[in-house]
Image (tube, grey):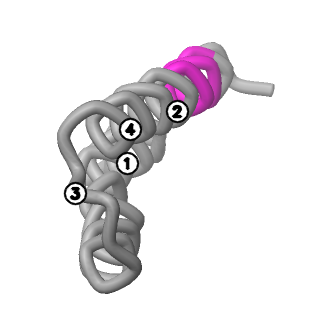
Amino acid sequence: MNTRKAIGMAILILLLVIYSLVCMLIAVNFLPDSKIAELIYYPIVGVIWIFPAMKIVKWMQPPETQ
């Protein structure tokens, strides 16, 4: 396994754990007690983490040789 891929995988796992904990804390402390609010909040935060993850995955790819 490539060093860059190992570092990227560790960062991705750490990102996902921290992000999910932060989203959970925000939901518990600030979200109104409403099913509709949960139905809106959780899909949105479930998709947002993909954008930093894409940048990490792109960084993990080997550099193109010319």
Gap in Å between the C-alphas at discs 3 and 4? 9 Å
The segment highlighted magenta reads 7-14
Membership of 58 in magenta stretch: no
Distance between mark 2 and mark 3 Cα atoms: 30 Å
Q: Nearer the viewer, residue 24 or 28?
A: 28
| Residue type beneath disc 4 | Val
Above/below status of 31 relative to 11: below
| Residue 58 percent across, percent down from the top left | 34, 50
Q: Would you identify the image quadrant in which residue 18 lies?
A: top left
The answer to whether mark 2 and mark 3 are in CB contact below 8 A is no
Q: Which residue is mark 2?
A: 12
Position of 53 with respect to 32 (left or right) is right
Residue named by callout 4: 28
Q: Helix or strand or loop: what does disc 4 sit on?
A: helix
Other residues around mark 2 within 10 Å, as few (<14) / some (14–19) / many (≥20): some
Q: CA distance from mark 1 to mark 3?
A: 29 Å
Q: Position of residue 24 (x, y in %)?
A: 44, 38
Q: Residue at x 69, y 24 (%)?
A: 2
Q: Residue 57 appears at what percent x and percent y?
A: 43, 48
Sequence-earlier tag: 1 or 3: 3
Residue for badge 1: 53
| Residue 10 belongs to the span the image colors magenta | yes
Can you tell which mark lies on residue 32? 3
User: Around disc 3, counting alpha carbons within 10 Å, would you say few (fewer than 14), some (14 to 19), or many (20 or more)?
Assistant: few
Of badges 4 and 1, the one in the foreground is 4
Q: Amino acid at mark 3?
A: Pro
